[in-house]
Image: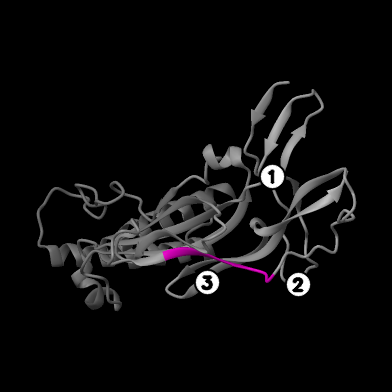
Amino acid sequence: MKKILVLIAAMLTVSTVAAQQTINNHLVGVATTADGTQQLTEPSTFIAVDITVEQEQIIPGPYARYAQKLLGTRASLVERSSFAVTDASIGLIPYCEAVSAKPLAEDKCVVASHMGDVATFAKILPDRIENSVIAPEQAAEQAAQMIFSIRKHRMELITGEAGENVFGGGLKDALQVLDEKEAALMELFFGKHITTTTHQRYVVMVQADKKSYPLAGFNTTSGLESVANGENSIISLNITPAESAALKYTPLADARAKNTAEVRVANNATCEVILNEEALCSIVVPIFEFGTTVKIAK
């Protein structure tokens, strides 16, 4: 009879601390399938940890130094970039996904910009409407005046003072154009604000003699990096199993029974993703490696 060695990691049911323990059993040893094939089963637990990181980037505008004087609000004069872990999640996955994981959510980049590309401003700034060359401060003054003019014109459209012939969809479109024009001019003073969101998955194969798993290094100035870089904070998966696997729902075989089968009973364990001694997320899941093997009657 054909024998196949199969490493099986069944998808397990997640339980919470407050809920009644969910006990998961898995046959250990040789099992015969419906088609007569024999399989050698050994339950294993794979944990997927998904980390979401956001990068906030500020690129100063060409008129940043004049924002306080002309608009009454200070603008950043230097480029800044910072990273933060915004989300983390833990889940159990079967063996097939551990070696060929499903794709993560798509990374995305949101740019509060209407002119130029992601990280630069247009070659010809949006406030320039003639070919004469003027000093930067004078150009900034004109841009500030255009902002106030747009706001005044928008209010006139809204109140009807200048919008008696603009209504319905036309009014909506006109207001949208004014909003975009104002945003482009404000950007010249306060710069571009770029938010980039990335997702990273780490898969851990649980080992019975190991309860802490370093996943990645993290730095607020560079984001996720290698664990080997000693200058970074470490993101780790910590597992704390219960004192013993609960067997109250497992019908144990009588000591004198001969027709028995070995079953692995998973033990509930608290899994936490830790960064700088702070838990980013926590969940209670059943883990076979911290369980116990018992015999049940066939």
Specify the quadrant that holds the N terminus: top right
- Nearer to the camera, 72 or 224: 224
- As helix, strand or loop, the secondary structure at mark 2 comes to loop
Q: Is residue 83 visible?
A: yes
258 to 252, vertically: above or below: above
Q: CA distance from mark 3 to mark 2?
A: 18 Å
Left or right placement of residue 10 versus residue 182 in this view: right
Task: Rate crowding at label 3 as few (under 14), some (14 to 19) or many (20 or more) other CA atoms within 10 Å.
Answer: some
Specify the quadrant that holds the C terminus: top right
- As helix, strand or loop, the secondary structure at mark 3 comes to strand
- Nearer to the camera, 57 or 23: 23
- Percent across and percent down for residue 105 are 52, 46
Q: Quadrant of residue 3?
A: top right
Q: Amino acid at mark 1?
A: Ala
How many badges with numbers are in the image?
A: 3
- Of the two numbered discs 3 and 1 on the same chain, state the one appearing first in sequence: 1
Residue 210 shown in magenta: no
Q: Which residues are magenta?
A: 235-243
- Of the two numbered discs 1 and 2 on the same chain, state the one appearing first in sequence: 1
Q: Give me the disc on residue 161.
A: none
Q: Residue at x 14, y 67 (%)?
A: 137
Q: Give me the disc on residue 279.
A: 3
Task: Rate crowding at label 1 as few (under 14), some (14 to 19) or many (20 or more) other CA atoms within 10 Å.
Answer: some
- As helix, strand or loop, the secondary structure at mark 1 comes to loop
233 to 196, vertically: above or below: below
- Of the two numbered discs 3 and 2 on the same chain, state the one appearing first in sequence: 2
- Percent across and percent down for residue 191 are 28, 62
Q: Is residue 161 visible?
A: no
Q: Residue at x 46, y 75 (%)?
A: 277
Residue at the outermost top position: 1
Q: Amino acid at mark 2?
A: Ala
Q: CA distance from mark 3 to mark 1?
A: 27 Å
